[in-house]
Amino acid sequence: MEPPLVRPTMRTTIQTLSIALLVLASCLAVAARTDWLGGIQVYAVKTGSMEPTLPVGSLLLVRTPAANRPLGTGDILTFAEPGSPQVMVTHRITGSDGSGNFRTKGDANPAEDPWLVNRADIRGVLLAHYDHLGTVVTALNSRAGIFWLVLVPVLALAFLDIHTIVETSAELHASRRQRTPDAR
């Protein structure tokens, strides 16, 4: 005889989804702020300079190049914009000046970038990209995204725990009434 099929309850579903969202939020937070992925960094494409190769909203996975790895024409790099180290740019190498600096250009741009990129400013070489996922990651890293990924699951789990306590208390109270004889 086969065991009966166990259907997940609404409680189990909410708990599972809440925990999954908390784990996802934790992984995204750690991956975005550390070298947790073994030299792989995550970026989102915010402009159309690399279209159609990298559409706006794409998620990029880039890996820090080994010091001895040659870089050449056609490689797609993510680098700190010269003069604005907090701004990341992802463009294709179009050439080199022979002394370790690279000329770059966005595929959709009519001309090369007005700067040379030094190897020290390179954050990574493109490994993979996923259309539209960058938009999702950017949204999840916003205040509203953190609210949905952290606060809502925590509140759902707290509500379920409170509901369980109230339900158990009511059941205990009812069972005591049934066992206590009416003293009229």
Image (cartoon, rainbow, N blue to C red):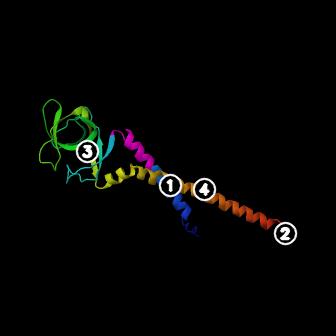
Residue at 66% x, 60% y is 166
Give the residue pinned by disc 1.
153
Find the distance from the CA under tag 2 to the CA under tag 3: 77 Å
Q: Count neighbours of disc 2 (C-alpha within 10 A) and say few if under 14, some if 14 to 19, many if 20 or more.
A: few
Tag in front: 1 or 3: 1
Which segment did they paint magenta? 24-39
Give the residue pinned by disc 3.
126
- Three-letter code for the amino acid on which mark 4 is drawn: Asp
Disc 3 to disc 4: CB gap under 8 Å = no
Find the distance from the CA under tag 2 to the CA under tag 4: 33 Å
Residue at 45% x, 46% y is 26
- Three-letter code for the amino acid on which mark 2 is drawn: Asp
- Three-letter code for the amino acid on which mark 1 is drawn: Pro
- 169 vs 47, left or right, is right
- Which labelled disc corresponds to residue 161? 4
Find the distance from the CA under tag 3 to the CA under tag 4: 45 Å
Q: Name the foreground residue: 7 vs 137.
A: 137
- Three-letter code for the amino acid on which mark 3 is drawn: Leu
Q: How far across and down, in percent of the image, does residue 133 sit? A: 32, 54
Residue at 70% x, 63% y is 170
**Which numbered disc flags the more N-terminal residue, 2 or 3?**
3
Q: Count neighbours of disc 3 (C-alpha within 10 A) and say few if under 14, some if 14 to 19, many if 20 or more.
A: many
When the figure is inspected, residue 162 is found, relative to residue 125, above or below; the finding is: below
Q: How far across and down, in percent of the image, does residue 167 sit? A: 66, 62
Give the residue pinned by disc 2.
182
- Which labelled disc corresponds to residue 11? none
Check the picture and name the quadrant holding the N terminus: bottom right
